[in-house]
């Protein structure tokens, strides 16, 4: 399950706050601590800005606006910035570029027809599609739509706007030309889009991803809980830092055993620890070995697994320190998410007819976004959905 973030000029994968030390060691911890503390302070002040945004579970993600070189309105999928970009100015372009994906064709055509009614005359933007004309259902006195995993329901005046609209989008990024590298392909992503330039039109329901924390009651008791967990994580980092990160380095990084193990525990509700990591790796290698045809190949795979397991067991304390620190970062983040969810952006949220919170939130710290997600709820549902 991949999401996007700003690293360089385009959007790439966004990390969970608590996972950053599993990817980047001490540097990752400092970023996680900084991002969580920034969100904490933002909530204390009751601010509203693009520095803290709500994640909307829309699909697909689209790039649109007036092309800086042609001046013509276009829509595109995330392939807009590929080496061979697929830019669509007409229905015919969409059919030619995306005919293999009928659902995407339909959404891009609707975007092409309706977004010019609200988009500024200049600028390139990115957003998530929330619904098309035929994706809405009247339900329990409101209007519902399910772009991906979450079902959103608008009530009251908001429901009337959704009901009339033929297309819905949440805008979360804007692109700017790079003065040092002119050209569309070198445009730079900005997580603070100027959405106030968008016009109103009944055919298009559009929202900013800004999250208004003035509507969140962040109590002193909850602030103390946050601080307790951040301080506990900082203490582990200070006491065991260099040795802990160096020892666990073989299993850090993107796609690493630590990352897949944490996702495994999200699915199973297990509490992460060193022996659980060793068991996870052993199970993974056993599956791989069972698919091999020769006893020699199987033996090599089993030998490799044994080395991983023995290394983790002989350094059990350092792995447990890292996972305990991860736990405290996650607990601190959960305090933030629990409170941020008190403002749902004017929409009800359900997964499989059960009430839930928003997909999550994004805090923009030190030039990078970090996601704050209720992993026991949304991330678990999404991971299980991917596995089905």
Image: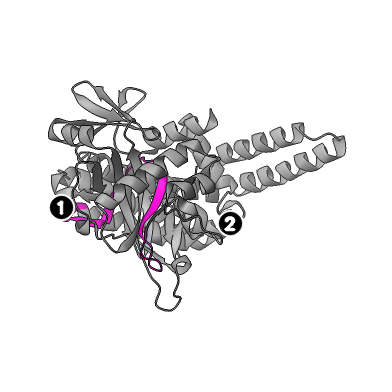
- Nearer to us in this view, 321 or 258: 258
- Image location (x, y in percent) of residue 209: 27, 49
Placement of 67 over or under 133, stated as above or below: below
- Image location (x, y in percent) of residue 70: 40, 66
Do the residues under discs 1 and 2 have CB atoms within 8 angstroms?
A: no
- Count all numbered tags in the image, as a single digit: 2
The structure residue drawn at horizontal position 22% and vertical position 39%, both measured from the top left corner, is 344
- Nearer to us in this view, 48 or 57: 57
Placement of 35 over or under 181, stated as above or below: above
Identify the secondary structure beneath mark 2: helix
- The residue wearing badge 2 is 249
Magenta range is 43-72
The structure residue drawn at horizontal position 38% and vertical position 67%, both measured from the top left corner, is 68
Task: Answer few, some or many: residues within 10 Å of disc 1's Cα (few below 14, many 20 plus, some between 14 and 19).
Answer: some
- Nearer to us in this view, 40 or 111: 111
- The residue wearing badge 1 is 46
Task: Answer few, some or many: residues within 10 Å of disc 2's Cα (few below 14, many 20 plus, some between 14 and 19).
Answer: some
| Left or right: where 81 falls relative to 156 | right
Is residue 65 covered in magenta?
yes
The structure residue drawn at horizontal position 53% and vertical position 41%, both measured from the top left corner, is 99
């Amino acid at each position: 399950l991949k999401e996007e973030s700003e690293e360089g000029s385009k959007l790439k994968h966004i990390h969970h706050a608590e996972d950053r030390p599993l990817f980047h060691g001490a540097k990752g911890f400092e970023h996680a601590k900084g991002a969580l503390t920034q969100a904490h302070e933002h909530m204390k002040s009751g601010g509203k800005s693009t520095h803290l945004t709500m994640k909307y579970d829309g699909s697909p993600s689209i790039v649109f606006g007036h092309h800086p070189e042609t001046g013509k309105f276009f829509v595109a999928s995330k392939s807009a910035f590929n080496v061979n970009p697929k830019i669509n100015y007409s229905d015919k372009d969409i059919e030619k570029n995306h005919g293999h994906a009928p659902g995407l064709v339909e959404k891009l055509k609707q975007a092409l027809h309706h977004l010019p009614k609200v988009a500024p005359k200049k600028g390139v933007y990115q957003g998530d599609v929330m619904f098309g004309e035929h994706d809405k259902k009247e339900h329990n006195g409101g209007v519902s739509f399910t772009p991906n995993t979450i079902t959103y329901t608008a009530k009251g005046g908001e429901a009337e706007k959704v009901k009339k609209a033929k297309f819905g989008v949440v805008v979360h990024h804007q692109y700017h030309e790079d003065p040092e590298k002119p050209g569309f392909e070198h445009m730079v992503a900005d997580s603070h889009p100027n959405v106030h330039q968008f016009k109103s039109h009944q055919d298009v329901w559009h929202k900013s991803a800004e999250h208004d924390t003035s509507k969140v009651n962040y109590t002193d008791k909850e602030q103390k809980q946050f601080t307790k967990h951040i301080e506990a994580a900082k203490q582990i980092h200070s006491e065991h830092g260099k040795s802990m990160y160096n020892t666990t380095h073989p299993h850090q990084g993107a796609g690493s055993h630590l990352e897949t193990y944490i996702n495994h525990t999200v699915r199973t509700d297990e509490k992460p620890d060193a022996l659980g990591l060793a068991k996870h790796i052993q199970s993974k290698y056993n599956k791989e070995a069972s698919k091999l045809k020769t006893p020699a190949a199987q033996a090599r795979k089993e030998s490799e697994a044994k080395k991983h397991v023995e290394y983790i067991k002989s350094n059990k304390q350092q792995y447990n320190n890292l996972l305990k620190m991860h736990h405290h970062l996650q607990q601190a983040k959960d305090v933030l998410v629990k409170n941020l969810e008190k403002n749902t952006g004017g929409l009800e949220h359900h997964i499989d007819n059960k009430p839930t919170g928003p997909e999550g939130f994004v805090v923009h710290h030190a030039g990078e976004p970090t996601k704050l997600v209720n992993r026991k709820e949304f991330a678990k549902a999404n991971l299980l959905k991917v596995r089905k």
